[in-house]
Each structure stands twice: as structure tokens, then as C-alpha cells.
Amino acid sequence: MRIGHGYDVHRLTEGRKLILGGVDIPFERGLDGHSDADVLVHALMDALLGAAGERDIGALFPDTDPRYEGISSMRLLQEVMRLLREKNLRVGNADVTVLAQRPKLKDYIPQMRENLARVMDVPADRVNVKATTEEGLGFTGAGEGIACHAVCLLEE
Ligand code: MG
């Protein structure tokens, strides 16, 4: 078994969609970034790559590369899964915590899990997604950005 950890932050800004776990969430602002800025999928991919000993998404999908401009992070997750399969690794489970003051994410979590589980080729109960506020503290509390932590277990 191999364990991995990922962490990511994106800034909230006007004029962008809010995409988390491949779900388009209605909100007055969205996350800024080179891709669709899906901070949840970014943290998850870094956990998977970490467990696989394959550096990180910045190395794999550089934000200077025009091919990745505006790309769906779910597409990038497909690429990460392809890499894992080449190394004979499969996902045991993953656990993800999103830190966001707003919006409330509870209603969107089942769809996120379904999206992630489909691409990761596991049942949905092997991809857990949680959301919490930070009680108004720090940059997530001020609504300046959204952060995400992820851990995963890979099996050889
Ligand atoms: Mg990112």
C-alpha cells in the first residue's frame, strides 16, 4: 500500500465559474486559475501522484502550457489515472476535505463523489468528500479563497 497527501488553494474571483469535484456550483464568484481551477480535484491529484511517487500536478501539467488553459480538471484526473494504471497502481480509497466559508456544499457532495469514483474506477464509498468552514477565520473564512486537503491510499 502507498499513502499520499495533497493540498491546494485557489483564489475566489468574479466572472469565473465555481467548479468543485467536477460539479458546476451556482455561486456569485468562482475560482481563479489556468485550468478550471477545481481545487478539490487538484488536491486529490496531488495525493494520487504523491502516493505514486510521481511528483505533482505542477510538474505534470505546467500552467505555462496553453494546452491546459481552461481545461476541465476531470480530464487531468483521467491522465493521472492513466499514469497510475501504467504503474500497476489502483486506488484503495481517497478522503478529501474542502475548506470553504461559502457556499454550502453539502447538496453537491454526492454528485462530486460519483464523478470522482467514475474516473478513479472505484465505488463511490471509496471516495469520501467532506466540507467545512473555518469559522470565519483566515482567508477561507474571509471568502478570499477555497482550500482543499486530500489523502489517498493506492494498492499495487
Ligand atoms: Mg491548483
Image (cartoon, rainbow, N blue to C red):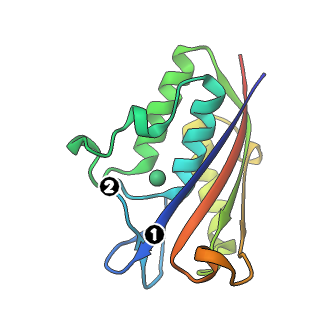
On residue 89, the disc is: none
**Residue 11 bears which disc, if any?**
1
Residue 62 x/y as whole percent: 34, 39
Quadrant of res 2:
top right
Q: Mark 1: few, some, or many residues within 10 Å (few <14, many ≥20)? A: some
Residue closest to the far front: 138
Left or right position of 141 against 16: right
Q: Quadrant of residue 75?
A: top left
- Does label 1 point to a residue whose CB lies under 8 Å from ligand 1? no
Q: Residue at x 72, y 75 (%)?
A: 134
Q: Are marks 1 and 2 in contact (CB under 8 Å)?
A: no
User: Cα distance, mark 1 to mark 2?
Assistant: 12 Å
Q: Nearer the viewer, residue 101 or 72?
A: 101
Look at 55% across and 41% down and name the residue there.
45
User: Which secondary structure lies at badge 2?
Assistant: loop
The relative height of residue 135 versus residue 36 in the rendered view (above or below) is: below
SS state under label 1: strand
Mark 2 neighbour class, 10 Å CA radius: few under 14, some 14 to 19, many 20 or more: some
On screen, residue 124 versus residue 21, left or right, reads right
Residue drawn at x 49%, y 23% is 83
Q: Which residue was labeled with disc 2?
A: 34
Q: Amino acid at mark 1?
A: Arg
Q: How many marks?
A: 2
Q: Earlier in the sequence, mark 1 or mark 2?
A: 1
What amino acid type is highlighted by mark number 2? Answer: His
23 or 54: nearer the eye? 54
